[in-house]
Amino acid sequence: MESAKHAGDAAVAVSKAYGVETMFTLSGGHVFPLYDGAVHEGMRILDVRHEQSAVFAAEATARLTRKPGLAVLTAGPGITNGVSGVATAHFNGSPVVVMGGRAPQSRWGSGALQELDHPPLLKPITKLSFTATGAESVGQDVEMAFRTAVAPHRGPVFLDFYMDHLFSPSPTHEVRTQTPSPLEPDPDDLAAIARLLAEAERPVLVYGSDVWMDRAEEAARDFAETWRLPVIPNGQGRGILPSGHELLVTRARSLAFKQADLVIVIGTPLDFRLGFGWFGSRDALARVVHIADAPSQLATHMQPAASAAGDLSVVLWSLGTACGDAGVKPDTYASWVSKLADTAAAAIAGDAELLASDSDPIHPMRVYGELGKVLADDAVVIGDGGDFVSYAGKYVEPKQPGNWLDPGPYGCLGTGLGYSVAARLARPSSQVVLLLGDGAAGFSLMDVDTLVRHRLPVVMICGNNGIWGLEKHPMQLLYGYDVAAELQPQCRYDQVVTALGGGGELVTKPSEIGPALRRAFDSGIPYMVNIATDPQIAYPRSTTGV
């Protein structure tokens, strides 16, 4: 028998109006009316094994579909378990709405089960964190949450509901979904940037995640190709210029940043991943331009030579016009582009030996040499780990935009299984590949059960070196010893996957990698290729993030 309409129905109806198709959750009595609302409204409910995975799945949904994601968490520990996911969404600028249960208002202050005032905990890592005011206002409150989440600069919003309010009748709410009006950049700012480009001899473009999230990938590719500018992608900027593109100089990154006289960074913070915005040499610092989707995202820790804020498609199309007015000549940069392209080509050629290495124990680069042979153009590649995933950032070059997911600047491990759930739903016909460090596997591997229960095939590749590589090697360098950096050598994470209903195998020889990957892709089930790699090999990183 169908239950009566209540506040849960109103909340779900508004969510659907904003494009939400799936509610990610872990069961809890405080939020039963939201589940009932999903049943009434025909929304998919996908339940996970840890609340962090629900939020990570909602966040990955937002990043892959560019529509808001929804996570529903029960009161108290349900919400505190999801905090790392909310923080990750905050740092990634992902439009996620997290709805939480809350002890009944009628019992508030008397010690009800899991009674906790959640919004103050979430306030520092959300755009808005609040409690719905009553059953009659749930529709308006949820609409405000989604409207806030999708407005530039995008980000997570948290709201919770008193349990007794959720169960109460709620009036039908007429949803007026609002698409944010494009923020127009200041023409004077764009003119200043164009003048800097006209004066430059060795410019570099950096495209970040917000270029993708702002649906500006076409404008970004056109801008680079029109003005013949070398490009280094960052985060979800990867794939805007596809693998093999003549202007894509990722493998010449070090030379490009050291010798550039102008670096234009678009859609990503000037954080540790970009040397905090310091490029060039001590004797000749490069001038820096910072372009963001909202004024709040422009760098304040250093003074760029110029900056602009606005809808990134509008910014890039308008900047192209300004460059024409400023007399920018694309052929000016030809020798610079050629130098970077030659450097990148030499680096790629130099990789060939290690990508085909027959060393035993397995060199982690051999894993990526074999993976490159079987990846489809539209594969979604997810990284969750330290050293092992750093290799992926270097050697997996997407052929299309929107097909790369990593934890982002917050660096939270454990994102992988939640991201995989979302990726399989968002891209049902694509390969979904999760690259796991063995350390990262310990955070969320139980959610393989979620993949199995919901019939979501994903190929998991675990780089298993039996250590916390990102910590062990630096600690050895600093102190001559290490502690708290050992894991089980060749731990059978593949057997965990098998025990949970998937498939898997342990690989210890380089020649076994390729056939194992093919078996994984052919299996049609969640499948782990658990590859024992050499613990003596550390990724040659140039930054620790400090």
Image: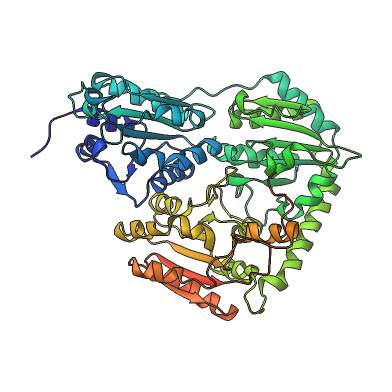
* Image quadrant assignment for residue 526: bottom left
Image position of 520 with respect to 185: above or below: below
Image position of 508 with respect to 138: above or below: below
**Of the pair 59 and 68, the residue shown nearer to us:** 59
Q: Residue at x 32, y 60 (%)?
A: 455
The quarter of the picture where the C terminus appears is top right
Horizontal and vertical percent position of residue 254: 78, 51
Image position of 77 with respect to 130: above or below: below
* Image quadrant assignment for residue 473: bottom right
Q: Residue at x 87, y 42 (%)?
A: 281
**Left or right, 121 with reference to 224:** left
- Residue 437 visible to an observer of this rendering: no
Horizontal and vertical percent position of residue 345: 76, 61
Horizontal and vertical percent position of residue 398: 59, 55
Q: Residue furthest right?
A: 283
**Of the pair 478 and 401, the residue shown nearer to us:** 478
